[in-house]
Image (spheres, rainbow, N blue to C red):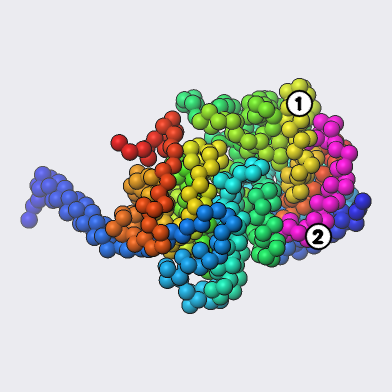
Amino acid sequence: MSVSRREFLLACAGGLVVGASGYFLWKEARIRRWQERTFIGKAPDYGADLRTVILAGLRELGVTEKDLRGKRVLLKPNLVETMPGAVHINTHPLVVRGAVEAFLSLGAARVAVGEGPGHASDTLRILAESGLMEVLGEDRIPFFDLNRQSGYGVANAGRCSSLKSLTLPVCLKDFDFIVSLAKLKTHHWAGVTLSMKNLFGLMPGSFYGWPKNYLHWAGINPCILDITATVWPHFAIVDGIVGMEGDGPIMGEPKPVGVLVMGRNLPAVDATCTRIMGIDPHRVVSLSYAEGWLGPIRETGIRQVGESIALVRTPFRLIEEIPAQRALMPG
Amino acid sequence: MNTAAISQGVEQLRKRALSGGGFAMYPGGDFRADATAWAVMVFAALGVHAELIEPARQRLAAVQLEDGRVSISPEHPSPYWPTPLALLAWQGAPAHQEARRRAAAFLLATTGRQWGGKPQSVAGHDLDLQGWSWRSDTSAWAEPTALAMMALEAAGYGDHPRLAEARRLLLDRQLPDGGWNYGNTTVFGKVLNPMPESTGLVLNALSHQVPRDAVAKSIAYLEGRLPGLLTPWSLGWAILGLSAWGARPAGAPAATQACVARQERFPVYDTSSLALILLASRAAGGLASVFRS
């Protein structure tokens, strides 16, 4: 049987249409099916009993001693830069302490903290000046400078950027429960920085530089997705007791919100955070691409436990002159 | 004064020597080119543990790639920023003349990624000036540019046009009120914050290269910042940066000794940081003075 060129092209086009439709139907079905829970806990200030708030969240989210007994937990806070008196730049040391105590009380064999700040080549200075070193010293909690660690290559599971592989710090192999302990902030390149963007700090500066400019050239949003898909952290806690609005992640202004947001699924946690900030998560590029692939971001896909979003919603100021933030504005 | 702390620090470095030559970044770790180069610089400057220096230099030569670069590890050739450190570690070693020549040739042929004349409204500095980056295919930044300048200067390339342009880049990245950070001045109209470690490193690279007036605000910034610095990387670069401009703090010996002794309270110091604070305890004329002598 002979097939004309026209028939062949029509058959190919038909195949493409059927394939694409099938993919979108599959994705839509997956989005509709995927359900996650996020927890919003109120904490008016850093003097609150944060261990209790975090334990309440873990309980509501079904994280039990069975999940954590004997596990080696790595907490990855967001440490960027320090300024005297500023509590809105970095994950607050007392939130880190609350998380350490909560995970240890649920039977974790070991809890450590690791971070590779994106700007400063002296991680220990940031650790000391942020106040976190004092807290970790008192509690005898080990700290890993992820920027100075040697690295190991892994295949890029996301493949959103052109990077075929990612280099991760070797100490990551020593942990089996990774927690993104992020800060609730706007960001002048990514729009917002929450539990997914916080993972940039896992990437060793020795391999990616200060700043981790290689990831910027490869595309910030694709890299956010790539790192999340590759590392796939087990849990997220976002410090929104005092967040940052405006020209984040450093030069913005403090924004008291009085919440900790938690969950097992990072896109769901970040979607809840953006709703608290008064931002539609579908306008955040990395979240819109993550939907149905890395997690749900629709309200119907996320069951809120703890406080309701409506009760704590605190719209963050966005800057129109910053393109990544202008894209988040309604209309 | 606790000079025993310095001896203790040297001993800690010695224990990180590897049997096949070279040094690890942390106790029990594997070979790292950057850690090795820093350890060589310390032992050479302090005149101790000569028996560890040549095996370490040889290990650096063994991991040098065909094009002359020394990367963070042979499996990861792109992060080439340890190349200037290796060049400094080979300084004064005739046996490694060829390795030095190839490393210098690599640096002179390598630039950060250019902006290509695109609109630069977001950043307040010239993104087309050529310097050096941390790894291939990324922009030039302050710290790798300063390291490359120091290494090439020490290797006898001080008059090369690349160094002249790098000087312009560093001055262009200086913050309006003094100091440097990783290499951004203003972004979206906001002036960013200086950092002591970046400032100290760049001041080392610019000493004897630009008039004092050109960096006076940065020297003043660092003098003001110094008293609060506790950690070896920042304190080390700050002392070396001020020393390079004849402003070595009177308390430098005590501060460096206290910093080494402070390890009990901090997470274990990495080899590069420990080496830097040990160098700062001795290099009264800044880091470059070690290589001039």
Q: Which residue is mark 1?
A: B216
Q: Magenta span has A324? A: no
Helix, strand or loop at disc 2?
A: helix
Find residue A167 and report its horizontal and vertical position in percent: 54, 55
Q: Chain of mark 2?
A: B
Q: Could you tell me which residue is drawn at 51 percent across and 73 percent down? A: A68
Type of amino acid at the residue the image marks with label 2: Gln
- The chain ID associated with circle 1 is B
Can the viewer see residue A75? no
Q: Say which label, 2 or 1, has the lower sequence index.
A: 2
- The amino acid pointed to by label 1 is Ala
Task: From the top left corner, tell me how far across and down residue A150 is, in percent.
Answer: 62, 57
Comparing A314 with A26, the one in front is A314
**Towards the viewer: B9 or A267:** A267
Q: Give the label on residue A101, or none.
A: none
Label 2 sits on residue: B12
Residue stretch in magenta = B241-269
Q: Is residue B91 above or below residue A312?
A: above
Q: Are marks 2 and 1 on the same chain?
A: yes
Mark 2 or mark 1, which is nearer to you? Answer: 1
Residue in view at x 81 percent, y 60 percent: B12
Q: Position of residue A33 (x, y in %)?
A: 27, 63
A281 on left or right of B92: left
Where is residue A38 drawn, in percent x and y? Answer: 40, 61
Q: Is residue B260 magenta?
A: yes
Give left or right: position of A306 versus B157: left
Residue beneath the point at 73% across and 57% down:
B266
